[in-house]
Amino acid sequence: MTGPLMKGVVCKICGFAEHDILYRGPIRVGRFGQLSAESHTVWRCGGCWAGYLPAPEADYVSGEYRILVDGSDTAEDFYRLHDGEQAEKLRLLGTGGLRGSVVMDVGCGAGSFLDLVKGLCRLTIGIEPTASLRQAVVAKGHVAFPYCSDVAAEWEGRVDVAALFSVIEHVDDPRGLLKDIRRLLRPGGRLLLSTPNRRDWLLDVLPDDYASFFYRLVHTWYFDADALRRLVELAGFAQASVVYSHRFDLSNAVLWLREKRPTGLGKLDVPDSADSIFRATLEASGRADYLYCSCING
Ligand SMILES: [Zn+2]
């Protein structure tokens, strides 16, 4: 990568003070089509390779963020939009070892994932700053707190499994958040985290139209597998392993190429076999849109 360097700004993950340019151009400020008027620069840390977009952290407390991305901050709309995503997360987590355990979902929204695992668990803890969603979590019998730092001291070192889905890219201090989670995990406890993959193949195929959709104001951090492994290791986790998951089908890809916009799933009549090969190829080559990292509190 060539171009100007940003010097003197210390990386919040690794402390390195030299960044080069990962992306410069318009970015998404809300849903599809809402682009920034000005160019933004996403920097890449020379020490840990994390992509970094300097921007104020969004307001996750008031419901404003959910309204921005989902159009609503009610639990009913959260279920409608996100219940369908939960089976994939459970597949990655696996169900062995969950019985009788304490599971904590950080950034749990209205609790869709916790609802799925609750039958196996001794206790389910939801971390969710948005009050309207957190109230729905509590009403279903989960324990809930706004932030990890609010979790009662009695749960320190007692969480068996922590989940952190699509959260790490939003926070100002990812390493600090992982440290907060480690305080609550038992020794040997497991963290499963996920985040978009900045090696997503569409970024190469549609460097303008897709990049200005992929890079967005509410995402401060952009990881590939190496940067994600580096982050969890710097935070004190061990045995990090990353797997790729492509969440979108071949229909979505064809329509991106044709119409330069996201269309959701299943809009074109694509044979299931072609779709399976498409996804498996992206996952095997590291070019899928999403990363899962599993690691152990060492
Ligand atoms: Zn760094």
Image: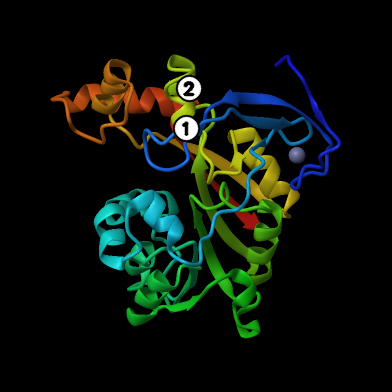
Amino acid on which disc 2 is placed: Leu
- Give me the residue at 55% from left, 69% from top: 160
**Residue 41 falls in which quadrant of the image?**
top right
Q: Nearer the viewer, residue 226 or 176?
A: 176
Cα gap from disc 1 to disc 2, whole angstroms: 8 Å
- Colouring of the image: rainbow
Instruction: Report the residue marked by disc 1.
Output: 214
Q: Is disc 2 placed on a helix, strand or loop?
A: helix
Quarter of the N terminus within the rendering: top right
Q: Residue 157 bears which disc, if any? A: none
Horizontal arrangement in the rendering, residue 10 relative to residue 2 (left or right): right
Horizontal arrangement in the rendering, residue 117 relative to residue 182 (left or right): left
Residue 298 in view (yes/no): no
- Give me the residue at 33% from left, 68% from top: 115
Rate crowding at label 2 as few (under 14), some (14 to 19) or many (20 or more) other CA atoms within 10 Å. Answer: some
- Give me the residue at 40% from left, 78% from top: 142
Horizontal arrangement in the rendering, residue 47 relative to residue 107 (left or right): right
Rate crowding at label 1 as few (under 14), some (14 to 19) or many (20 or more) other CA atoms within 10 Å. Answer: many
Query: Mark 1 touching mark 2, by CB under 8 A?
Result: yes
| Ligand 1 quadrant assignment | top right
Q: Is disc 1 placed on a helix, strand or loop?
A: helix
- Residue 258 placed where, x, y %? 27, 16
Instruction: Report the residue marked by disc 2.
Output: 203
